[in-house]
Amino acid sequence: GQNIDQPTEMTATEGAIVQINCTYQTSGFNGLFWYQQHAGEAPTFLSYNVLDGLEEKGRFSSFLSRSKGYSYLLLKELQMKDSASYLCAVRRFNNNDMRFGAGTRLTVKP
Amino acid sequence: DAGVIQSPRHEVTEMGQEVTLRCKPISGHDYLFWYRQTMMRGLELLIYFNNNVPIDDSGMPEDRFSAKMPNASFSTLKIQPSEPRDSAVYFCASSVLAGETDTQYFGPGTRLTVL
């Protein structure tokens, strides 16, 4: 089996930086994904890591440490529209078997 | 590109009735996934197909659930008979194994309510 843990809720202020953590335990690790999901909408892809280190994409960055089973999503210069759930997902083996964490609901306040 | 298409977008039915959800993946994608999302359990993988063949259906809750993919452009998820606890948003997603990202693209979902 596998466990994917992330905080249930977080709150941050507009313009600030927030870090959303994700820890996982799995066999056959083959990549970690972050998805954003606004209320009532489908998840949309944000970032992907398969090697250790930081991947930067505009205001969003994602970090992975495979030895620690740990990833984080860093959101800079927060905007109100960033209020959403952020889902951590782990892909296993050499296929598209992907399992999602429960998601972190981020609220950005003025 | 039209993206992943799901129908219906909303379905309200009574307990015991048969429900059929439909999905059209993105053209050229050879993986198709069915997920269920609830507040209590989050996003759960039910089943996925590769080249129209079911690969892993271990997430299908019970025999009341079945999924088919008769061709590369169409899949169905059927619940028979439906129960109130099946109420959830059901997402279909597709992807292509073409390099590192292989990201899954989600459809808009079907919100199912079983009374």
Image (cartoon, rainbow, N blue to C red):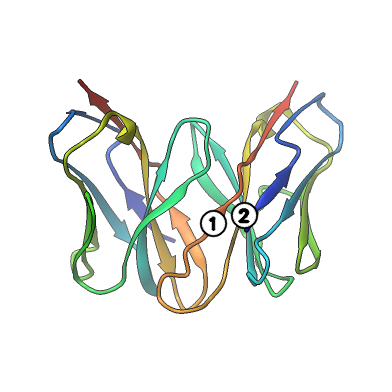
Using the numbered discs, state the Cα–Cα distance from disc 1 to disc 2 in whole angstroms.
Answer: 8 Å
**Image point (48%, 62%), residue name:** A98
The image quadrant that residue A103 belongs to is top left
**Image point (45%, 76%), residue name:** A93
Q: In the structure shown, which secondary structural element does the residue marked by tag 2 occupy?
A: loop
Classify B113 as above or below B32: above
**Image point (36%, 69%), residue name:** A31
Q: How many marks?
A: 2
Q: Horizontal placement of B19 versus B60: left or right?
A: right
On residue B105, which mark appears?
1
Classify B107 as above or below A26: above
Mark 1 vs 2: CB contact within 8 A:
yes
On residue B3, which mark appears?
2
Q: Nearer the viewer, residue A6 or A11?
A: A11
**Residue sitting at the far right:** B17
**Image point (20%, 20%), residue name:** A110
**What chain does badge 1 belong to?**
B
Task: Measuring from the top left, give residue A24's x and y in whole percent.
Answer: 30, 58
The image quadrant that residue B79 belongs to is top right
The image quadrant that residue B88 belongs to is top right
Of callouts 1 and 2, the N-terminal one: 2
